[in-house]
Amino acid sequence: MKRSLLFAVAFVVAAGCAPVPTPRAVDDADAASRSPAALEAKTHAAQVWALAERRRLEAHAALDEGPPARAQFLAEEALATYQEGAALARTVKAARRSETASAESEKLAAELAVVDAALKIASADVEALELRLRVAQGAEPPGTSRPASPEREAARREAARGLLVQGRLLCGAARLLGAGSAKPAPPASDKTPEDPSSGPVLSRDLAEAEQRLSELDAALGAPGEKPGAKATPIDLATRARANCLSVLTRTRRQSAAAASGGTAASSADSLLSELGAMGQKAGFSPSRDERGVVVVLRDVFEGDDVGARAKSLLEQLDRVAAAHARFAVAVVVHTDKPVSAADKAKWEARAAKVASRFGSVPEARRLTVFAADALPAATGKNARNTRVEIVFIAPEAL
Amino acid sequence: MAGDADGARILSRVSLAWAKAATAIVRATETEKRADAAQAKVKDLRDKVERAKALLTETESRKGQLTTEIARAELAAKQASGASVEGEKKRLEKSPPKKQEKRP
């Protein structure tokens, strides 16, 4: 009994002298101060972290000085402040991440725009090339004409004469628009692709087309030659004209690309309407064809000279030509009957006189063609076939 | 604790500190969401750029291939066109114009 009493007294003494346990919040605050989040806060939200540390140390001081409740409250405050600091650090880091991502986004968007633009151009090129390939693959090779009766040969001969004049006009127009000025390209190969609108290729093709025209001219013989005496090279005539038209078209395409804008069609429109207005007073009606804008004049010559009325009209047309300097001018003289070799020079001199009325157009931009009766406007020997065509050669495709 | 003005002041500070912490956590969450969205956009854009570049390479290669095919096809077409003129030359050399056939 005595013994148990002794134990009880010893326990009460021991319990009375034991230190007060540290409030849990203080331990938690200590743990929080060592956590990675607190380290982050120290780096990114130093002020808040410093406040939290101060409260934690105050809590430790309160443990010694008391009361313990004060230590606990201060530790709680330190814990909350550490939490705030950690959250602020997260905000700062996220904001930086967001900023970096936005900058990268902008850079990538710009890069994407560049790649997209390049892709658009490349896709358009591919589309154009696919079309060109389909055209080249689908092109029917022109067939060879068969032998025909003398009457048919005579008709072919007339057609070939017309094609020859048209070919001369088209090739001449291409030359006026700048084709043939570059050094000719070597013959086409199936290995090295070539740009059909490039200057050297145009020069080579123009020379070939003109060579064919010369062959055709030689094959057709003198104008007075008896029709049907020999077979007509009608295929050569069609090919020669087609080649000249192809060169002219490609020259215009090149010139349009150089001008980098479709202004030709609108300028041809304005030229046509200008000439239309002039024609209403002067009695002519301009038209448009593959060469450009055409004005037909009749009764131009009085003897070997240009008549007074025609002179006045040509003066007006020269003023129009001066206002549309991008258009070259071709003068085509037609007759209503065949012209002998002796008279040809006389007619060519007359054509030159008409061309010389275009003083505002440089000589290198003028073309004179004597068509004789190769391109009649009306069938048979009709006086209406005697005429002078003034062609304003369009620099770009209409 | 009654009449403990100092304790009351500290308790008031504690509640304010927790409120500030809560606000900061909400703001942090929102900012992180925005950052995640921005990074997702970057990833999306990067994928798009990669795809566009791959497509561009493919298109350029197709362009080269087409250019070669065109050179071949156009040369063949030109040769075929020239062949018709050559064929005609032979006809002109061989046969004079036929005489008109009498119709019955």
Image: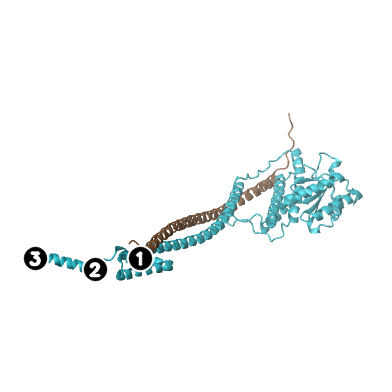
Mark nearest the camera among 1 and 3 is 3
Q: Which chain is the one coloured brown?
A: B
Rendering coords of residue A150 (x, y %):
75, 39
Q: Position of residue A358 (x, y in %)?
A: 84, 55
Which residue bears the numbered disc 2? A19
First of labels 1, 3 by sequence position: 3
Looking at the image, residue B104 lies above or below residue A289: above
Q: Is residue B31 visible?
A: yes
* Residue A89 position within the rendered picture, expressed as x and y whole percent measured from the top left: 42, 64
**Upstream in the sequence, badge 2 or badge 1?**
2
A34 left or right of A165 in image: left
Residue on which disc 3 sits:
A3
Q: Would residue A66 appear left or right of A94 to someone viewing this image? A: left
Identify whether B34 is placed above or below B84.
Answer: below
Which amino acid type is shown beneath numbered disc 2? Pro
Tell us which disc is closer to us: 3 or 2: 3
Amino acid marked by disc 3: Arg
Mark 1 crowd level (few <14, some 14–19, many ≥20, 10 Å Cα):
many
- The residue beneath circle 1 is A74
Estimate how packed mark 3 is, as few (under 14), some (14 to 19) or many (20 or more) residues with alpha carbons within 10 Å: few
Disc 3 secondary structure class: helix
| Residues beneath discs 3 and 2 located on the same chain | yes
Marks 2 and 1, Cα distance to the nearest angstrom? 20 Å
Q: Quadrant where the N terminus of chain B lies? A: bottom left
